Image: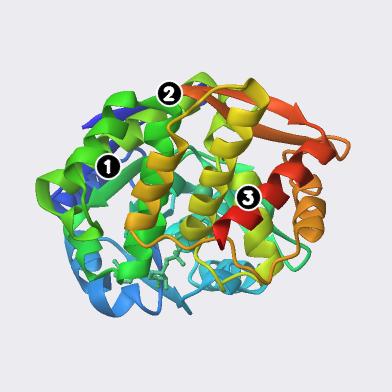
Amino acid sequence: MLYIETKSKRYPLYLGEEGLTALRSIYQQLQPKPSSVLVISDSVIAPLYMKQVTEALADADIHTYVIPSGEKEKSFENYYAVQTYALEKGMDRRSVIIALGGGVIGDLAGFVAATFMRGIRFIQMPTTLLAHDSAVGGKVAINHPIGKNMIGAFYQPEAVIYHIPFLYTLPEEEWRSGYAEVIKHGVIGDAHLYDWLQKEILSLEDLRGEKLQYALQRAIAVKAKIVAADETESGVRAYLNFGHTLGHAIEAELGYGRMTHGDAVAVGMRFAHLLSERIYGIELARKEFEKWLLGYRYPKLPPELNIERLLLRMKQDKKAELGVIRMVLLKGIADVCVEEVPDVVVLDTLAQFAQTEHL
Ligand SMILES: NC(=O)c1ccc[n+]([C@@H]2O[C@H](COP(=O)([O-])OP(=O)(O)OC[C@H]3O[C@@H](n4cnc5c(N)ncnc54)[C@H](O)[C@@H]3O)[C@@H](O)[C@H]2O)c1
Ligand SMILES: [Zn+2]
C-alpha cells in the first residue's frame, strides 16, 4: 500500500488485483463507522462493476446513483441531482461516497462529497487508466458551460483503490488517452519510467498485467510526490500541466469530446518539446519523441484548427495570469520549468509546428 501525503491529509492508495478485498477492509476500518454509503458511477461502468462493489461492502446501508457516461455529464445538473438523491435517502455527515469510474465520476462525486453537508468522506475507485492522474491529488470539480472544471475544490479522499482488473474493458481510445498522462509523468518526473516505457511498451496492448501495474505505480508516484510538495497548486504542481496548455486549447476549439483529453495532451507535449528547444536553444531528441508518440497512433494537430484562435484559447487558460501564457517547458527528461512565453513566440512556433505536422 502506497500512501499519499498532503498537508491536509495522509491516505492509502491500493493498486493491484485484490481491490475489492482492499475496499472491504478499508471500508470496515473507517472511523467513525459510516452510517450509509452512496456509490456513484456512470452508465457504462455500473452494469459492468457495480454489483461487485456493492457486494464487497456487504452489510452496509448502500445506495447507488448512475449518471450517463461522458464529459458533458460532469455538470451542475447532475451534481444537484446527486445531492437531492443523497438528501432524500437520508444520508448524513457520517455517510460515505464511493466514486466508481473514470475522471468524470471521480471529479463529480468528489465535489459532491466536498460539499454535501459541508463535506463527507469519500473513496476513489478509478476505472480508467487516465484516472491514475485524476484520482490522486484531491482536485474535484464540475464543468460550467463557460469552461471546464470551473467550479470545484481541493478535497482529499479517504483512500484510492485501483482494482486493475476493472481496466480491462476499456476501449482502445481510452487506453491511449490515459497513457498520455503516464508518458507525461515520465517526462516531468521520472527518467527511469520514461526509458522503461520506450523499451517495454511497444504498443498499447503491452499495457497489461505486471507491466501495467509497474507503469501505474511509477506514474502515480510522480503525481503523489508533486502533490505532497504542493497540495494547492502554488508551485511545482504546475508541472502537471505539461502538454496541457495547447492540449486544453485544442479540446476547447474542437468542442469537448471530439478528441480525447490524452490525445490532445499528446499533441501539446510534442509542441512543448519544440517550444522548449526554441526557448532554451537546446536539442531534446524531439524527432525520436515524435516518432515514439505517433507510433501509438496519437493524432497530429487537426489541420482545420486556426492557430490565432488556439493562441487566444491559450491566453484564457486558468493557469495564464493577466493573459500572459505560462507553459511548462523542458530542459531535459525530469527537468522542467514554468516559463512565461510571449505571444509572438508562441504564435510563430505554432505556425512552424502546424506546417511540419502535415508535410
Ligand atoms: N482531478 C484531476 O486532477 C484531474 C486530472 C486529470 C483529468 N481530470 C478529469 O478527468 C476527466 C477525464 O477522465 P477519463 O478519461 O477517465 O474520462 P471518463 O470518466 O469519461 O471515462 C472515459 C470513458 O470510459 C468509460 N469507462 C470508464 N471506465 C471504464 C471501464 N473500466 N471499462 C469500460 N469503459 C469505461 C466511461 O464511461 C467513459 O465513456 C475529465 O473531466 C478531466 O477534467 C481530472
Ligand atoms: Zn490531463
Query: Left or right: 134 with respect to 315?
Result: left
Question: How many numbered tags mark residues here?
Answer: 3
Residue 61: horizontal and vertical position, in percent?
A: 32, 64
Please tell me whether mark 1 or mark 2 is closer to you in this view. Answer: 2
| Front-most of residues 324 and 60 | 324
Mark 1 residue crowding within 10 angstroms, few (<14) / some (14–19) / many (20+): many
Which residue is depicted at the point 34% across and 36% down? 220
Quadrant of the rendering where the N terminus is positioned: top left
Residue type marked 3: Phe
Provide the residue designation for mark 3. Answer: 353
Dots 1 and 3: beta carbons under 8 Å? no
Residue 15: horizontal and vertical position, in percent?
A: 21, 43
For label 1, the SS is helix
Gap in angstroms between the C-alphas marked 2 and 3: 23 Å
Q: Residue furthest front?
A: 359
Image quadrant in which you'd find residue 285: top left
Pointer 1 or 2: first along the chain: 1
Task: Indicate whether 203 appears above or below 327.
Answer: below
Please tell me whether mark 2 or mark 3 is closer to you in this view. Answer: 3
Colour convention: rainbow
Which residue is depicted at the point 53% across and 68% down? 259
Image quadrant in which you'd find residue 172: bottom left
Residue 333: horizontal and vertical position, in percent?
A: 42, 25
For label 3, the SS is helix
Provide the residue designation for mark 2. Answer: 334
Which residue is depicted at the point 50% across and 26% down? 283
Provide the residue designation for mark 1. Answer: 216
| Front-most of residues 222 and 262 | 262
Residue 95: horizontal and vertical position, in percent?
A: 43, 54
| Front-most of residues 278 and 14 | 278
Gap in angstroms between the C-alphas marked 1 and 2: 17 Å
